[in-house]
Amino acid sequence: MTIAGIVLAGGKSSRYGKPKMFETYQNKYFYQHSVEALKQNSLSPIVISTNEKLIPSFRQNDVDFIVEKETEAYQGPLFAMYNALSKIPHADWYFVLSCDIPFITSAFVEKMICLTENGQYDAIVPIQSGNIHPLLALYHHRSLAKMEQLLAKNIRKIRLLLDEISVLTVPFSAEEEVFININKPQDWRKYE
């Protein structure tokens, strides 16, 4: 079984005011924490999905890049996921992580990967305090067809994808910091 790792790092960061994936925590860019958590679990390939405007700012030469053209950029995470997953055809599973989760750990990734042995699900998604986290989740290759169908209807919400496929939700405690994502500068000031 092959599991690819994908870091989504092509958004506008409009609430943050600048590309938040290049903020630093413990001397690493935010996106590098996601890359490291995937690498420590030997996922292959590991891919950063971004766009033409942001690609010059990345300083990572040990991963692959999928670069959205200007006409494809900023169409939301469902499009970004589909675009990346569809360009890695030989994986059984795809571990998708966002680029704004500096507290992500390899232990979290390992725990989620262990659940892929049960092949009946199309997605394995963590849930914490009633909040589902689809950008820290695993998607089976089977889910690509449903993503394509939704995008063809101009449906862009990942939650609507999850309503259409077989999902295993994995509960995590309210204290788990892995799920802290940084959307605004004031969010980050709390943790800096």
Image (cartoon, rainbow, N blue to C red):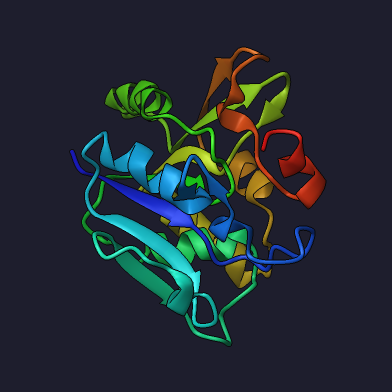
In this rendering, does residue 156 appear at all?
yes
Q: Is residue 14 above or below residue 171?
A: below
Quadrant the N terminus occupies: top left
Q: Quadrant of residue 88?
A: bottom left
Residue 125 to residue 82: above or below: above
**Residue 87 seen by the camera:** no
* The one of 67 and 140 positioned closer to us in this rendering: 67
Q: Residue at x 68, y 15 (%)?
A: 174
Please, which residue is most extreme toward the left here?
A: 1
Q: Is residue 81 left or right of residue 13?
A: left
Locate residue 157, reporting x and y percent.
69, 54
Of the pair 91 and 190, the residue shown nearer to us: 190
Q: Residue at x 24, y 43 (%)?
A: 43
Relative image position of residue 149 (x, y in whole percent): 55, 63
Rendered location of residue 160, percent (x, y): 67, 48
Q: Position of residue 3 (x, y in %)?
A: 26, 43
Q: Quadrant of residue 14?
A: bottom right
Which residue corresponds to the image point at 27% horizontal and 24% vertical from the top-left?
117
Relative vertical location of residue 97 with respect to residue 62 in this rendering, above or below: above
